[in-house]
Amino acid sequence: MADEAGVLVEATDIARFFDVSRPALARMIAREPRRTLRAVDGVSFAIPRGRTLSLVGESGCGKSTVARLVVGLYRPTRGRIGFDGTDVTDPAARGSGRGSIRRRMQMIFQDPYASLNPRWRVGGTIAEPLHAFGEAGGRAGANERVAALLTQVGLAPADSEKFPHEFSGGQRQRISIARALASQPEFLVCDEPTSALDVSVQAQILNLMKDLQAQFGLTYLFISHNLAVVRHMSDTVGVMYLGRIVEIAPAETVFRAPRHPYTRLLMDALPDIAMTGRARVPVGGEVPNPISPPAGCHFHPRCPLANDRCRRESPVLREAAGTSVACHAVEEGRA
Ligand SMILES: Nc1ncnc2c1ncn2[C@@H]1O[C@H](COP(=O)(O)OP(=O)(O)O)[C@@H](O)[C@H]1O
Ligand code: SF4
Ligand SMILES: [Mg+2]
C-alpha cells in the first residue's frame, strides 16, 4: 500500500471459522457432518499510520469478525496480524501494562449503551482505562484527565457526575470515544460507530472522529454497512462479501470508478452521489448462507455478469491501476 514504511496495522490472509455443528448426539442420529461457518476467509490489508481503512459490506459479510480479530477479541483460525512490526496473533504478544499493545489499540462499538456501565458515573467509566493501564496519576490526576477528555469530545467536565441514561445516543457515543481515548491509543477500531444514530447526529460524530484523528494522528479501521458513511472518512476502502475482500482501492478511486459488480450494486443503492441523475436501485437478492456459500465466485447468484467460469472458479484479488479486484469479468475485460 501507499506508504510501506509507515504501516501501523497489517493483516495477512486472516481467517476465522466457527464450528456451528449441532450437538454430537443430534448430529449422529441425523447422520450429519460437522458444520463450519467461514465468517472471515483470507482477508489482507495494511493501514499506514494516521490513515483510515474502511471495510464496507452488507450485514453478515464478516466485518465485525475482522474487527474482533484485529483487537484480539478472537484468535484467528489462520493468518497473521501485525501491529507496529510486532506479530500480535498470539494474545500474549499484546501484553497488558502501560507499554502494551493492548493499550495502544481500542475499539468503539455500534451501541454505546451496551458498552457503558449503566450504574457507573460517566467519569468512572472514562477513568477505568487510566487505572487499568496504570496511568491515572492519583485521584486529582484522573479527574483532570477525565475533564480534558470530556472537553475533547464536545461534552462538559461536569458531565462526569452523570449516568449514561441522562445522555442522548450521540452524547453516549461521545462518552465511548472519550473512554477509548483515555489510554492515549494510536489505533482505533470503530465498528459501525454511528449506525444506531440519526443522520444529523451521525455527521457530527463522524466530524468529531475526523477532528480527533487530525489532532492526535490516530489510525482508524472504520467499519460500516453504508458506503455513504465511509465516503468522507476513508483513505482506502475495502468492500467485503461473504468473508472476503472483493475490491480494495483508494477511496476516491472506489467512488469514482467502482469495478467489482458488487461494489457497483452498493453504489447504485446510494442516493445519487455522483449527481448523475440516475434512479436509485436497491441491492437485489440476499447474502447467501456462509455455512454453504455458492461454488465458484460467492457473488455469482446475484451477479448480472455471471457466466460458467464464475460458477466454477473462485476469482482472486488482482491489482490493476491501483485497484485490487476479485472478478473474472473485470480480469477478462468484459465488465
Ligand atoms: N461467534 C460466532 N459464532 C458463530 N457464528 C458467528 C459468530 N460471530 C459471527 N458469526 C457469523 O459470521 C458471519 C459474519 O458475522 P459478522 O462478522 O458479525 O458480520 P458483519 O459484522 O459484517 O455483519 C455471520 O454469518 C455471523 O452469523
Ligand atoms: S467473478 Fe463472475 S460472478 Fe463474480 S463478480 Fe465477477 S462476473 Fe460476477
Ligand atoms: Mg457487524
Image: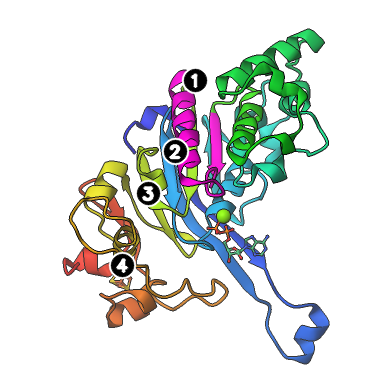
> Which of marks 3 and 1 precedes in the sequence?
1
**Which residue shows up at 81% across the image and 32% down it?**
120
> Which of marks 2 and 3 precedes in the sequence?
2
- Region rendered in magenta: 187-215
- Other residues around mark 3 within 10 Å, as few (<14) / some (14–19) / many (≥20): some
Amino acid type, callout 3: Ala
Residue 86 on the magenta span: no
- Other residues around mark 2 within 10 Å, as few (<14) / some (14–19) / many (≥20): some
Amino acid type, callout 4: Val
Amino acid type, callout 2: Ala
Work out whether residue 179 or residue 12 is closer to the camera in this orientation and state it: 179
Work out whether residue 118 or residue 226 is closer to the camera in this orientation and state it: 118
**Which residue shows up at 61% across the image and 38% down it?**
107
Instruction: Give the Cα separation between the discs numbered 4 and 2.
Output: 24 Å
Q: Secondary structure at mark 2?
A: helix
Instruction: Give the Cα separation between the discs numbered 2 and 1.
Output: 20 Å
> Which of marks 1 and 2 precedes in the sequence?
2
Find disc 3 in the rendering and name its residue. Answer: 228
Instruction: Give the Cα separation between the discs numbered 3 and 2.
Output: 11 Å
Find disc 1 in the rendering and name its residue. Answer: 216
Find disc 2 in the rendering and name its residue. Answer: 203
Residue 170 spot, x, y in % from top left: 58, 37
Residue 198 on the magenta span: yes
Find disc 4 in the rendering and name its residue. Answer: 281
Residue 9 visible within the image:
no
Residue 51 lies in quadrant? top left
Q: Is mark 3 within 8 Å of ligand 1?
A: no
**Which residue shows up at 35% across the image and 62% down it?**
316
> Which of marks 4 and 1 precedes in the sequence?
1
Instruction: Give the Cα separation between the discs numbered 1 and 3.
Output: 25 Å
Residue 163 is left or right of residue 56, and the answer is right
